[in-house]
Amino acid sequence: MFLGIVVIAFSQTNKEEQAIKALLEKESATWRAKDVAGHAACWQIRPYSRILVSTGNGQVIDVPPMAMVQPKPENMGDGGTSVNANYTFSIQQNSAWVSHQELSISATGKQTKTYEIRLLEKIDGHWKLVGQSIMVQQPIKP
């Protein structure tokens, strides 16, 4: 009997992980495509939402959360693509945090590597981003 519970719990967790990955891939793609409506659909702004970006030169940018649901197309991506890897999940009922690495490749071929921590909530059966922190990865020089 206990084994059945573990299998069900694992299956449910795997299903949630796949749903979250799909959302994060959509969020990345809609930003690059300047798809304002598609990008906004990935987010749910809460009073505690926070978007922090640490740049490679040590600056921290505190992005207004409304910029995720009402972005100006000129501030969005320039096409290109991205690949997310090395996901780590913590899923607790209707809340989750996920860390991953992202390799962004602009339309001109410029590559940027980041570490990202994403905060999510399950709202009406769908995962939505409520916050994130992005750290631009700098090569370590000897």
Image (cartoon, rainbow, N blue to C red):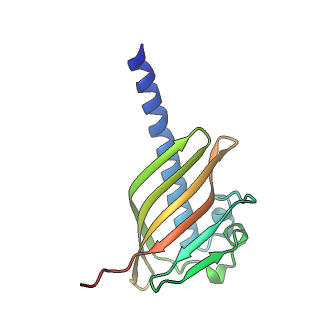
Residue 103, image quadrant = bottom left
Residue 55, horizontal then vertical, whole percent:
49, 81
Residue 3, horizontal then vertical, whole percent:
38, 19
Residue 136, image quadrant = bottom left
Q: Is residue 82 left or right of residue 61?
A: left
Report the residue at 55% width, 54% height from top: 23
Front one among 109 and 57: 57
Q: Is residue 102 left or right of residue 20?
A: left
Report the residue at 67% width, 68% height from top: 68
Number of labels in the image equals 0
Q: Is residue 7 left or right of residue 66?
A: left
Furthest-top residue in view?
1
Report the residue at 71% width, 59% height from top: 48
Q: Is the residue 27 above or below the residue 17 in the image? A: below
Furthest-left residue in view?
142
Residue 47, horizontal then vertical, whole percent:
75, 60
Residue 74, horizontal then vertical, whole percent:
64, 84
